Image: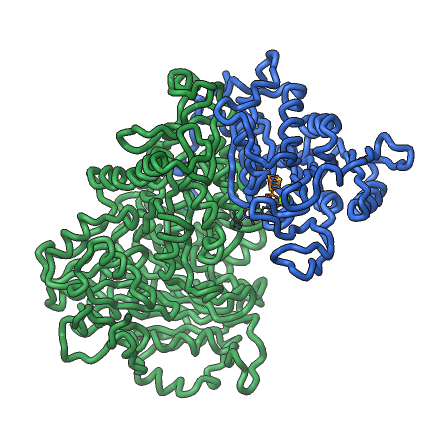
Chain colours: A blue, B green
Amino acid sequence: MSAFSAIGEEREIDRDEFTPGIEPQPTWCPGCGDFGVLKALKQALPEAGRTPDETLLVTGIGCSGKLNSYFESYGFHTIHGRSLPVARAAKLANPNVEVIAAGGDGDGYGIGGNHFIHTARENHDMVYIVFNNEIFGLTKGQTSPTSPKGHKSKTQPSGSAKDPIRPLSLGLTAGASYVARTAAVNPNQAKEILVEAIEHDGFAHIDFLTQCPTWNKDARQYVPYIDVQDSDDYDFDVTDRREAADMMYETESALYEGEVLTGRFYVDEDRPSYGQEKRALGEMPEEPVAERYFDEDYKWERSADLLDRHM
Amino acid sequence: MYSKGFRATVAKFYPLRPPAGRDQNMAQDELIWRVAGGSGDGIDSTSQNFAKALMRSGLHVFTHRHYPSRIRGGHTYVEIRASPEKVQSRGDGYNFLLALGDSFARNPQDDAYYGNEEVKPLSENLDDLREGGVIVYDEGLLDVSEIDDFDERVEENDWHVYPLDLRGLAREQGREVMRNTAGVGATAALLEMDTEPIEELMTDAMGGDILEQNLEILEIAYESVKDDHEFTHDLRIPEHDPHDEEYALLSGSNAIAYAALDEGCRFIAGYPMTPWTDVFTIMSQHLPSVGGISEQVEDEIAAAALAVGASHAGVKAMSGSSGGGFALMSEPLGLAEMTETPVVLVEAMRAGPSTGMPTKPEQGDLEHVLYSSQGDSHRVVFAPGTVAEAYDQTRTAFRIAYEYQIPAIVVFDQKLSGENVNVPAAHFDREPNPDLGSVLTEDEIAEAAHHSSGKFKRFTYDHEDGVSPRSLPGQKGGRYLATGNEHNEVGHISEDPENRLLQMNRRLEKMENIREELDSRDETHQTYHGPEDAEYGIITWGSQQGTVEEAVDDLNEMGHSVKSLGVSGLMPFAAAEVEEFLESVESAMVVEMNATAQFRGLIQKELGRYGDTMHSLLKYDGNPFEPAEIVEGFEVQTDGDRASTAANTRYEPAVGD
Ligand SMILES: Cc1ncc(C[n+]2csc(CCOP(=O)(O)OP(=O)(O)O)c2C)c(N)n1
Ligand code: SF4
Ligand SMILES: [Mg+2]
């Protein structure tokens, strides 16, 4: 019997279960896009059949990092940029836990960029939500890796000399097997994409456009948005890496022209997740390692049995 | 500020010899065999097998490895000290040199930056060779005419030289690399030792033609040396009886890894860095076969963060690095302190600052390990002094980490990491401990305190030992928030002053309780040596312990009254024991491998006094202490007439001296 009986529990799940009684009201600014992520996530989990006790929501630092203060589940609010290494290890330790990582654009594409590349590359079976508000919110509006070229802020008084990062393209080249962009202004699409991402067996990267009315753009600047799957203007195969790459490039460029393109950009259902790869190599057991510590019959291996080579 | 004597380094070279007055018979009754050659020429495996053969034949062994930060070429050597008595340091100098060629040496050029590499396996090793010592060199690769004054020095030191064409022999029989085997055969002949254990080991490790050729070369070398040479030297394999118990030859890195496995550690994440790579490699090779997981990741920030994540989710986990990589771990380390996530980190020190000297030992990371990361640090730090202690203390580190929900660090260095020594096999014959420590089962969670909204109170205030038990993701009813921010009982972010004090004090209280628990155990982690009523003391920490103890024996034999204390409990500091020791002596010399006397500073900080009773003997030239240097340092300290220590160590007088 599992020591983690919340996992895989079959029961009715109410979206209110995901609202923490202790901190039901987020402290984000009025009109902040982060509310949209929270709302979509609260809808997505019950729809994907996940309960608060079987979910681990791991966040970084930023306004976005507060997500798990306002979301009822197991939570780990880590340090700036490091949600992914914490999250993916938790997944390896107990693959049956639903692991979701989240953080800001500075957190994920800047200070934690290296972890983003490598976690995507390894294709861990988890969801990664990047709250992309094109700004450092929590530290009061400095230029971020996704701020447009020329963006002025207190720390870039003459405007940024840097081209912004191309997050979708980066996710794709790094190795993410599901890449999407959605927006806080479109909660229905966001919820659907989140459900798909949770159900996807591999690294699902969601670049989530979240307006920051306090330091950057407000909600109006993200409308109208276009769903590339619904629009007749775009026709590409999300399972084709090259076509996906072209579409991403166009989408990323369009954002800075004021055109908001959203939807699924790349989906590879065939690629094995990292856990599957490691198990196939015999480098990870079939049963979650976390279960073994509760198994009273397990015969733990001893180093005394390894000594032969030293004698 | 540094006292004046601190900078008084005398630039005079003292060749290392056994100290005057030291029992010469004792010194004769040991073999210190040095095999020198090029990095990449298989010196490591040759020496390891030879050490094992000596151990199997009934001797006690201790190895010391010297190598450059280079893969191919560069002068490298391994020393094996073998004696019928227990050996605990590399000893002073050595008495048998097997100089193989460096097959990757660069062609000699005038004024080459690296000097004449071709002759280094011979020329670089002469200074430490004792009087009356034996030299075997491969005349197929080395030419003594390129060494200034070789013949004069041979004569002056009464060395016994046997030039042999090892390369030629190996080439004839099989392959040139087998010249190492030829050298071992020649060694065995000159020492009149039985080759059976060597052959046994070869048979264990090789097969087919390679084995046949090696055995052939071994025998030819052995027989031809025996038949064709007249032995002028006195040195022979020390007389000894067979061992009366089983021994295993292993290094500090082996011991740390095995302790981790025995504590049920089934997750490691790391990034290669010398010398930490040894532990990481050993773990990575064993974990899959015991159903564990090893992850080589993008950097050390990730490595430590992964260990925290795995532990948070309920798997006993570790990570580690050497100085530079450990610096990158400081944020995840602080996160583990704040979220009370158990984790064990290993810090394998090498000479710093920055990239420093990657393959050279030093103890310069003490303060780094104790304090790195923001805020008031609270962590457990052990510094094992020997291979056996490395096993014991790593096991304790895991137990404390998981029971007290606190990061525990095992700090050691390149010396302890790589030296092989024979340890009784029985030392490892213990029960595993897969216990997760203060983790609740679902039944216990159901009984535990929850917020009215259903959230588990993970960080409650009142606990006798400061430890508030935790739940694991996936357990029913156990959900809570872990955060690096200050937080309240259910883990939510809180800046309330009252809560802050309660949480902070509870976390810090664990430190006192851990020290209390460690002090109340039957066995201490501190190591005492020498006569209890001795007048003077020597205090050291970590890997210099064995060398200090040997120096203490030498000093007592020479008529001094001195004892030593090796301290392993660095944090929480073993204050009571160190205080008692300092109270019991006139004065104490603190021996450590760094330039700023960090450990002496720690003692003063922790005990609040003794600044005027402690002197320092420091060494930071990239080589560990030899017993004679400590003997000399001690004599300088107690005998005002002797002006100074050897050029490669530094004596720092007590404050106010
Ligand atoms: C190592 C470290 N550097 C800097 C900070 C300060 N800091 C906190 S959040 C943040 C950036 C926030 O921007 P982003 O990640 O985009 O999140 P947002 O607030 O916009 O959601 C910074 C620089 C920190 N907490 N840790
Ligand atoms: S500063 Fe911006 S991102 Fe942060 S809460 Fe306010 S609106 Fe949201
Ligand atoms: Mg941001």
Q: Position of residue A45 (x, y in %)?
A: 63, 23
Q: Quadrant of residue B4?
A: bottom left
Q: Is residue B243 above or below residue B539?
A: above
Q: Where residue B633 sits in the image (x, y, percent)?
A: 22, 71
Quadrant location of the N terminus of chain B in the rendered image = bottom left
Which is more toward the observer, B374 or B558? B374
Q: Closest to the observer: B159 or B613?
A: B613
Q: Quadrant of residue B655?
A: bottom left
Q: In which quadrant of this rendering is ligand 3 seen?
A: top right
Measuring 53% from the left and 25% from the top, which residue is drawn there?
A: A24
**Looking at the picture, how far across and down is residue B614, in whole percent?**
19, 64
Above or below: residue B164 compared with residue A89? below
Q: Nearer the viewer, residue A191 or A168?
A: A191
Q: Residue, x 49% and y 40% (percent of image)?
A: B307
Q: Which residue: 46% across, 73% down?
A: B121
Quadrant in which the C terminus of chain B is drawn? bottom left
Depicted B365 relative to depicted A210: above or below? below
The total number of labels drawn is 0
Q: Is residue A92 visible?
A: no
B617 or B181: which is nearer to us? Answer: B617
Instruction: Name the side, left or right, on which B52 lies relative to B581.
Output: right
Whether residue B529 sits left or right of residue A116 in the image: it is left
Left or right, residue A49 beside residue B586: right
Left or right of B111 on screen, residue B631: left
Percent coordinates x, y for residue B56 in the rendering: 35, 50
In this view of the protein, can residue B118 be seen by the observer? Answer: yes
Residue at (31%, 55%) from the top-left corner? Answer: B542
